[in-house]
Image: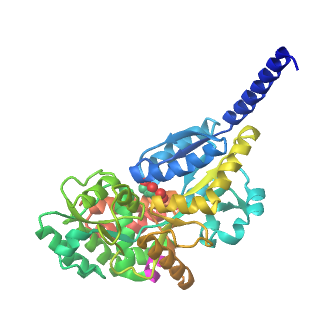
Amino acid sequence: MTIRMMGRLAAGIAMIAMTAGAAKAAEQVEVLHWWTSGGEAAALNVLKENLQKEGVSWKDMPVAGGAGSAAMTALRARVTAGDPPTAVQLLGFDLRDWSEMGVAANLDDLAKKEGWDKVIPAALQAFSKYDGHWVAAPVNIHSTNWLWLNKAALDKAGGKAPTNMDELFALLDKFKAQGITALAHGGVPWQDGTLWEAVVLSVGGPDFYKKAVLDADPAALSSDTMKKVFDDMSKLRTYFDPNFSGREWNLSTALVIEGKAGAQEMGDWSKGEWLRAKKEPGKDFVCIRFPGTQGSVLFNADQFMMFDVGEKQRDAQLKMASAVENPAFQIAFNTVKGSVPARTDISDEKFDDCAKKGMKDLAEASSKGTLMGSLAHGYAQPAAVKEAMLDVITQHLNGQLTTEAALKRLPEAVAAAK
Ligand code: GAL
């Protein structure tokens, strides 16, 4: 071969390499989500990096705001414009609402090839599928009835974790006496609802939760048990700090991490913030089921719904869905996020004690029939009913409605939203 020929060959090889590179770079997913806190972003990075390794680039569309209400507004605008993102973080009934509009992609072939039917819990599949077809890839299972305690503050208060509402109030009094904020809470509707649903479960037990929240039964919504729930909510408010209104959940978590507050009621995504601050469960913080709710789990699972974005992005979209269900990814992501895997075939070996408890509680609740959807995170009621209930809960917590008025308004608001 002459030098000239070799030169031409080299140029040809370079050209092929460049074309391959360009083809790879063209594979992209655009992802709409609300994972903007430190712990959430760290978890999402695991997915971004895994996809990058497969030649799929990531176009990020973050819309801040826990529980995703701002994200839903952004999604509406994109879908109305006929230009949906490739994948969207969605919860529960919202998955149904969007699927109903006929904008979902079909993941059946991939799901079949990878055997999703056998490993994704039925409680999730009920939302990952629409009309019998897979439309979403579930990422995790979170649960909302947790209480996160600063270990040093708890030790100073005697070290005993509360097991019912009375013991919780007694502990909060002790935190107050220590001169710290007793309960770190952010006053926004979804956070008010997250606290409220835990109190409903604690005060009324699982059967009452089913009646009042899952069935939205008018008698349960205005019952004496519900009166106690609202009274307890008013009492809990006396343990918040004066700056609670409008505060994002992760800033409240930070107060507990720094020892400026004693406790926070929040879903296990708050563990993501503790881990990110290099804090250890059992040493720096304690995770317990919200007092009085042991044995039941209020769940919410993040799912990436795939939108119909045409053939051009189809391959990248399927790669993303497959990457999400990959067992190694399920471990790498959920150990950072604070959630537990969305698959039943993952060992708890690599998980910390809080997640081990989460996985055990989940299995137990699922076998006992006490695994129930979270209202505040879209797994109990469709958006309209959820928003109507959250409105009443927030107004009551802010003192704009008396307990008597809230008991009357709650069933009325639900009926009007249905
Ligand atoms: C939830 C979501 C979690 C968490 C939280 C706060 O609705 O399921 O993954 O991120 O919002 O942003």
Give the camera-side residue of 16 and 216.
16
- Residue found at the far bottom of this picture: 368
Judged from this view, the residue extending furthest toward the right is: 1
Residue 28 in view in this figure: yes
Residue lying furthest top: 4
Q: Residue 187, located in which quarter of the rendered image?
A: bottom left
Quarter of the picture containing the N terminus is: top right
In the figure, 134 relative to 366: above or below? above
Q: What residue do we see at 38% from left, 81% from top?
A: 204
Task: Considering the whole magenta stretch, tell me its main secondary structure.
Answer: helix
In percent of width and height, residue 145 lies at 40, 71
Q: Residue at x 65, y 41 (%)?
A: 56
What colouring method underlies this structural image?
rainbow
Query: Residue 207 in magenta?
Result: yes
Q: 17 or 58: which is nearer to us?
A: 17
Q: Is residue 96 visible to us here? A: no
The segment highlighted magenta reads: 206-212
| Percent of width and height locating residue 39 | 41, 53
Percent of width and height locating residue 89: 55, 52
- Is residue 23 rendered to the left or right of residue 326? right
Residue at 28% from the left image edge and 79% from the top image edge: 161
Compared with residue 106, is residue 193 higher up or lower down, i.e. above or below?
below
Q: Quadrant of ligand 1?
A: bottom left
Tell me where residue 308 appears, x and y as whole percent. 70, 45
Vertical order, 320 against 152 (above or below): above
Q: Quadrant of residue 175?
A: bottom left
Q: Is residue 8 magenta?
A: no
Q: Is residue 110 left or right of residue 76?
A: right
